Amino acid sequence: MATPYKFVFGPQDLGTFHKGGYNEAAAKKLGELLQQNIEKWHIIYMGLRHNHIVHCLFSAYALGATAEELQVIYDREESYQAARYPVNEHDVKVMADKVKFRTYVGQQPHYSSFLLFFQREIERKGVKATLEEHLFAGDDYANEFLTRFYTSIFHPYLHIGYAFEFNQPAIVAEALAMASVHDPAWATFLPFYTEAEEAAVLPKLPGEKTLRRIMVEARHNETFQKSIDGESLIRAYNVVSNAPEESVRAASEYAVSEEQLDNVLDEMIDTISLTIATKPQPLKKSDPYKIDFYMLHSVNTLVLMPRLVDHPWITYENGIRLIEWAGRSHLITYISEMAPPITTAEIDDYQTNRNRGWDEIIQLAITHPTDDGHLLKCIRSLAWAEERLSPKYAEGGFLMTPESWRRLANLGKHLTINEY
């Protein structure tokens, strides 16, 4: 059984979308490699870039990678990681005081101490009680902590999504520790999230205010057009700081009811998947397509969302809250990326000499010689999205078609990799 300190994968831990069924050798290798990672490597390298070993391995495993292929991925990824800082036992004990806890936040040398602190919290209280206290209590401490899961391009959110999907408490601890050492400046997003949440009103009619509709309205909003400034990594911050009232107003229009959850997720999948291919950027004349790197992270969250509202570690109400905050995050990221038109035009126009099938696309993603996990995550999300939505196309309302998913995955080979 998996613990906050140990990884174990059985037939019940295959995840939301898994190709090929349970492979005992691959499952054993996955546990061994994740154990090495959590014990040896820091969560960030070069001061800014995230350790993607967890994301790489989970995605490859779910796509059917063999034990040998998982080892190749790990060997490549660990070659540039930073060693973990030593644990300070005194600091671990002090962190139980939330006032003192905050004095350590944002300082990367304390990552290992944060990790052990949260492993012990989970060991004593269980995952659900730990998350209730640190993420969902509704006080300033918990709301600030929850905010950190959506900033820095979703990395802690992705991490905890994998923890839920594959039932691994140790990854919950990693996610909490990662969020703890992110730059304190990310907490400046807190008013945006809490004020949007307070102002949100559920739509009176199904589909009345979809994420797509809110995004289209934002695209034509002059205030948002003027708010975009700076480099992509901080552009989202510039949107909410330069247009705070308009950001809250637009985000508050996105609300999710329990009755409409499935439809809301379907619409989010359809809309957000399109955003990575709606702003082509020329690499060279013969190769004009490029995936939008920042919206890519939004796409990579999609496959993780069903388990965030359907897992014994979380209440249904808190799961809905995670989905709502994610939708608002997608909105601001979209605005910050110049709010391109949401259409299938670029996918429909995409030309390739080889129209690969899913099996070939997946194998190329698993064995890609330089991918740092972004491509793997993207391909899995798209393959799962096709599987989820295909039976529902007769209902109408989708922009993507059954053929669009594979075309978009083929386009994904132009993805910029090893960027962050």
Image (cartoon, rainbow, N blue to C red):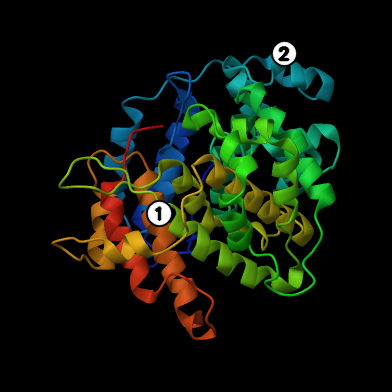
Which residue is situated farthest in the bottom direction here? 394
> Residue 157, image x and y in percent?
59, 44
Q: Are marks 2 and 1 in contact (CB under 8 Å)?
A: no
Q: Nearer the viewer, mark 2 or mark 1?
A: 1
- Indicate the secondary structure of the residue bearing disc 2: helix
> Residue 111, image x and y in percent?
59, 22
Residue 408 is at least partly visible in this image: yes
Residue at 62% across / 48% down in the picture? 221
Residue 2 is at least partly visible in this image: no
Q: In the displayed structure, would residue 69 be above or below residue 345?
A: above
- Indicate the secondary structure of the residue bearing disc 1: loop
Of callouts 2 and 1, the N-terminal one: 2
> Residue 195, image x and y in percent?
80, 42
Which image quarter holds the C terminus? top left
Q: Is residue 278 left or right of residue 354?
A: right
Residue at 36% across / 63% down in the picture? 345
Question: In the picture, residue 319 is in which quadrant?
Answer: bottom right
Q: Amino acid at mark 1?
A: Thr
Mark 2 is surrounded, within 10 Å at the Cα level, by few (under 14), some (14 to 19) or many (20 or more) other residues, namely few
**Residue in the foreground of this view, choosing between 294 and 287:** 287
Which residue is situated farthest in the front direction here? 222
Mark 1 is surrounded, within 10 Å at the Cα level, by few (under 14), some (14 to 19) or many (20 or more) other residues, namely many
Q: Disc 2 versus disc 1: distance between alpha carbons? A: 50 Å
Q: Which residue is mark 2?
A: 90
Q: Which residue is mark 1?
A: 278
Q: Amino acid at mark 2?
A: His
